[in-house]
Image (spheres, rainbow, N blue to C red):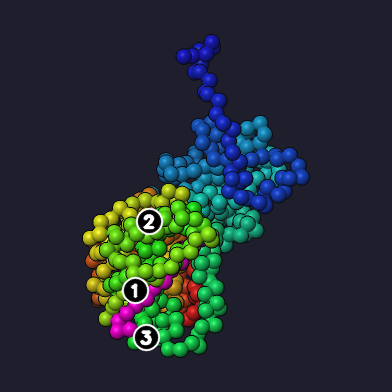
Amino acid sequence: MTTLDGGPPPLPKAAPPQDILALLGDHSTLTARRSAPPAFHVEEAADPAALGAYRRLRHDVFVTEQGLFDRHDRDEHDDDPRTLSLVARDPSGAVLGGVRLGPAHGGADIGWWAGGRLAVHPGARHRGGIGAALVRAACARAEAAGALRFDATVQAANETLFTRLGWRSVRPVTVAGRPHVLMRHPVGRVQALVTAAKGPLGDLLSALADGPPGTLGGPGYVGDDGAPVPGGGGLVAACDAILPALAERDPDWAGWCSVLVNLNDLAAMGARPAGLLDAVAAPDLPHARRLLGGLARAAAAYGVPVLGGHTQLGVPAALSVTALGRAARPVPGGGGRPGHRVRLTADLGGGWRPGYHGRQWDSTTRRTTAELTAMLGAVAAAAPAAAKDVSMAGVVGTLGMLAEAGGCRAVLDVANVPRPPAATAGDWLTCFPGYAMLTTETPERSRALPAGPATSAECGELTSGEGVGLRWPDGEITEAVTAAVTGMGTA
């Protein structure tokens, strides 16, 4: 089909583009708009016309106006299909400015992103902070894509603008013979998770610190995944409660997870599970059946008996499970020392649990009893110096807890972390990953855990200090956790 003038047919009318500032919560710019009609909105350049207009603007600014490049400003990032462009458009649809962002290098996306080619039309440079809005939108979009590091090489004249927006100067660099500054947006995703999930523990549990022998695990096991029972002859106990919202919303999955997390706790201690005790609360009998149904399925899959428990009906949904196991020599979480290598062993099979994308990874419901048993026995078989199963604090936060218990700092090599292709770096390092064990050992003794279908790889080291740094392929280290995670001190 052609139009009467011989041109191509009109494109079908699409839904109006949504303002990315509103979608990603850029409150600073949105608040300023409320007193007057918006002069522009920011959106992803999803169609050839918008992308073409942005690239022409780039040429006008960087080639014609500034003379930064000779013939064009295009580079390899423009040919990378993962590269995104955001544009600011006025109410008529005209492109007033734009910015480019995407993975910083051509390999696998490991969560290291870079922004660049920030350009604003000369006639719009004093119209309501278009450049600042584009920078904020780029930061939000990069974090939404799972970035844990976001850099930009900024012309020296724009360093003040980026500093006002919270960016930090890293070092001066030269681009096309002109002075620039490498700047970095502080991504606080890991720190926020760790602070919320584990930060209050030290202060909260201090009330128990002066209890009888064995309190909080006893010497060498304070803050551990499980606790050796005093006088128990190798008996190890672990206890976890399921989030009430999960027990209410998805009772079958909550029941499965109540077994999973407790058996993982025992496994991190090198303990062989002996049995489970449950405490179930539900608003009615059908809900209780679903909670217990998920628990029973998991117990059968793992081959671990439910010894007994307690049930309460007519109350809000809740679920807590205690696991008992045995270990001749429990593996401590606080056995790591400076110089130890860090290893992550994780089951990369499966996928995101429906309804919990980016937060809960489900591989265990698809495994056989033999595979589950092999994973649970991996720490006991390898007997590393320290071990901890990855909890709701995510890989990085749990590594911070392990390092804190040993009086150390940890450095994680992001590119070496085993990760499923379906998960972004930001999601994988902050989610509950199903089965994942962090272990440390001296370089001479470090070896893969015999964990059946799970993948095991060295991906960091313990050093002196505190917190967790993320080390990138260029050698840069960004701070993910700036201090001790729990405040409970060394084990």
Identify the residue under disc 1. 324
Picture coordinates of residue 417 (x, y %)?
Answer: 35, 61
Disc 2 is placed on an element classified as helix
What is the CA distance from the residue labelled 1 to the residue labelled 3?
13 Å
Does the image show residue 488?
yes
- In primary-sequence order, the first of circles 3 and 2 is 3
Residues in magenta? 232-246
316 w.r.t. 353: above or below: below
Q: Position of residue 261 (x, y in %)?
A: 38, 65
Q: Residue 230 — which label?
A: 3
Write the residue at 49% across / 55% down: 284
For badge 1, the amino acid type reads Leu
Residue at image mark 2: 293
Callout 3 amino acid? Pro
Q: Earlier in the sequence, mark 2 or mark 1?
A: 2
Question: Does residue 142 sit above or below 56 in this rendering?
Answer: below
